[in-house]
Amino acid sequence: MAMLRMAMRLLRREWRSGELAVLLVSLAVAVAALTGVGFLVDRIGRAVQAQASEVLAADARVESPEPLAPQLEAEAHSLGLQSARLTTLISVVFRGDASQLANVRAVSAGYPLRGRLKTAAQAFAAGEVTQEIPAAGSCWPDSRLAASLGARPGDTLMVGARVLRVERILIARPDQGSSFVEFAPSLLFNEVDLAATQLVQPASRMQYALLLAGSASALGRYDDWFTAQARPAERLARVADASPQIGDAAQRASRFLSLASLVAVLLCAVAVAMSARGYVARHLDVVALMKTLGATRRFVLGVTLLQMLLLSLLATMLGSVAGWLTQSWLLRALAGLLRTDLPPASGWPVLVGLTVAIAMLAGFALPTLLQLTRVPALRVLRRDAGPPPARLWLSLTPAVVAIAGVIYGTLGEWRFSAWFVVALTGALLCLALSGVLLVALAGRARGSASLALRHGLANLSRRRAAAVAQIVAFGLGVMLLLVLAILRRDLVNDWRTSLPQGAPNYFFVNIPTDQKDDFRSALLAAGARPERMLPMVRGRLIAINGEKINPHLPHATMPGGKRPRQRGDLADREQNLTWAAELGDDNTIIAGRWWGAGDAGKPLVSLASEFQESLGLKLGDRLSFDVAGEQFNVSVASFRKVKWDSFRPNFFIMFPPGLLDGTAGSYMTSALFQPRSAGALAALVQRFPGVSIFNIGDLLAQVRSVIDKAVTAVQSVFIFTLFAGLTVLLAAIQASRDERRYETAILRVLGAGRAMLLRSSFAEFAVMGLLAGLLAACGAALGGYLLARQLELHYHFDGLMWCAGVLGTTLLVGASGWLATRPVLNHPPRTVLD
Amino acid sequence: MSCEIRARESVAIIGPSGAGKSTLLALFAGLDLPSSGRVWLAGEDLTTLDEDGRARLRAARVGFVFQSFHLVPSLTALENVMLPLELQGRRDARPPALEMLRRVGLGSRVDHYPRQLSGGEQQRVAMARASIGEPAVLFADEPTGNLDTVTGARIIELFFELNAAAQTTLVLVTHDTSLAARCSRVLTMDAGALV
């Protein structure tokens, strides 16, 4: 009790001394960065977990891009399983002239087998649970679709060739959580209306699903039966398979944000270590006195530990509140991308925040603070008596353990954590080396400077280690923010400008073969400029050089044990195939040769370079394709570099004419289309209901908005690195406070005016900011260039952003440092020289 | 060197700078240990006690007054005086500390911080702090060294007054011959030895 009272009293009283405040702020910033991301990740995680059983809207589902064989459902019934059907595709939904790309979902009675649908009369209302599905002739758009089309119950929407009446607004469906990221709004309607939409065409990108629910044993038997007889395109997904995937996506996203918060945490740790040293230096006398008065080492240790614990609790409280506000902000920044009906967060992130606060103190402050217990009481009589120097390993080990613990605890994987450490250490070393160089150069330059600037530069050189730490802390924070700004500009803005003038702005897919000439005429009549029209047939790569690809494995395994680069990669799904005699000027042959007139009907194939790289193919390799149940064996004749951003019809896989001509298929084209009247597009849809229309501008806008939001979220988290930089600055000023007071006093005794001292202080920090800004802007320019190369973007140096980075950092650091040192300058010399 | 100080005796240690006065005081109080030889304080052999053992002994039996006052700057006058009792684990430190401050004439300055007090006032707080635990032995290291003559004289008065009332053993190091003259015995040191 005596310890606790003493700890609380000292904590309260010593608040003014400054070190504790800096310690608290550093810890609170770290906790805020962690909990801000933590709360968001926790909420997403809980949403994923809560929906794990509902995510398929069933216990299991069979999925296929082809219509499902009737025996799949018959077998389910014979095993006593419940079933329901779901057919989905992406299509444009019209309300009058307004149109919106939507995830169109035709369902049969019984859907969903697990979880509940919620509907309401208004978009974004709370909604009520319903057991029904939309009646024939009606539809339920979700809130986003209803809002974007301005649709209300009673209005009519056009889906393909079918007009459907809006009956209710769909508020929630269990399988909307199948990805925590949602790109397109959705529309639910009865499957009896599906045929009338005429959206089902041979080459439509349909996804057919049979939903199943029942006992685990029946499902197990169904699974066995399915594996034995399933066709290559059919997959059986069970809850156990589905949830880890979602977990994976959420985990990857959260790990990235955690990474951003970790940088701030580690910078704060530097500030913690610096302020702990200052705190100890200032408390040697007090502790010696307390020991003289009879305080034991145990008492001193107890008081110190209690103080640290109280400080951690306080920092966690403040940091968690800031973290909660941060996650609210992140949710707003990600609005429309993340689901808004996330469950509330648990207290877990707060606990993590507290643990990290304690770990930071234990790792970075405690070894220094323990020195206090070793101060000899003799110091009250002899000022030179101090604690024995700390052993290096003793002070470094807890810091290393704390860093390792925090990094591993946040990222949760050794390999990834190790990469992070290597990358961060590399970046910090580069920054530190450049910082040392810049500080040395600045020191050299002071000969010709004015008195105030000279004194400021001298201060910078004298406290070189602290100056470099501050330059690195600010440099890193500003650099990360600038890289993201460059990335956002190049990625988001440049896409807008890179759409070439006169390039097609619409894609038209699923044009029936017998209507292709009519459709082209209709486009021309409407004033559009259509590009070439290419046939399109769906097919699957089934073997390479005679070795089969097994599509039933979680990842399609390639011959020779090689795996495609990522899940859902090129060999793992159905492909659109085409044939053409002409290469097109947006394609360049990079290996092999394009076919001539004499090659018509020969078993050859030309592949896009992306497809070749993904599968590691060579010229002459024999590929087997399954097209509508028929097997084609072809050999690789050429590889093409495709200019995808020409926005003309292009395919990974092209055959010579005469080989696939007999297979049923459809055509696709693109066109520059500026509809003369608002109804022109709708008229086209009505005349050719099976044709899917994609507005490239809309699609790009959607992608841009996703990237924009993601970058904003990451940038928001990186703002914490700036705050962390500020805590390092405050800690450094705090540590040098006594020294600064003494210098100030001497200068004032010698006749220096207050204005000169303030100028000198501003000069010192402005130069520090200038160096940090230079480092950040140059680093960001280099990082931006490398990233742009990696992402195949056009990088151009942005002088304005560069200058803004340098100037902004100079002002930020200059003003912060100046403000923080002002109280020192206010000290009258008399009190200091006493 | 061999030296014995009896209970309730008042002893002044004098000598030129560097003679070893403060070192001797540190050894008496267990702030430091001799490289050889033994020191007994209130019947305990200090050389057999560890640091914490010596601290406990000081908490129970010893009071201190320093030349530069050594008040804890972040604590008020009252809290500084309460400190020894709190270190002994006493919960009712406040009333006796207030009383002690009144006795040294600082009843109206209890909530002031050391930096808000004059040198003489700070030394009075230090004396109150040294006396509050009713120590058996009071050590003082140049108690008037940082004070002007008039303030120093007043402090000395107060010092002996408190000492007489509490019947404390007093060991003080001083350059001030008038102060030394008021002690019952004077030990003179030179070059590390008693002369």
Image (cartoon, rainbow, N blue to C red):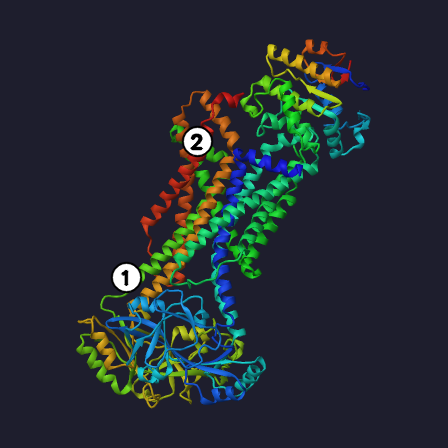
Residue A41: horizontal and vertical position, in percent? Answer: 49, 59
* Residue B5 picture quarter: top right
**Earlier-in-chain disc, 2 versus 1:** 1
Quarter of the image with the N terminus of chain B in it:
top right
Name the residue located 33 percent from the left edge and 78 percent from the top edge: A138
Report which residue position mark 2 lands on.
Answer: A822
Q: Residues within 10 Å of mark 2 (few under 14, many from 20)?
A: some
Residue at 52% in and 89% down: A78
Task: Please say if A627 is above or below A175.
Answer: below
Mark 2: which amino acid?
A: Arg
Badge 1 amino acid: Thr
Task: Determine whether, in the image, residue B124 is placed left or right of residue A750.
Answer: right
10 Å crowding of disc 1: few (<14), some (14-19), many (20+): few
According to the picture, the residue beneath numbered tag 1 turns out to be A497
| Image vertical order of residue A601 relative to residue B176, above or below | below
* Location of residue A146 with respect to B187 vertically, above or below: below
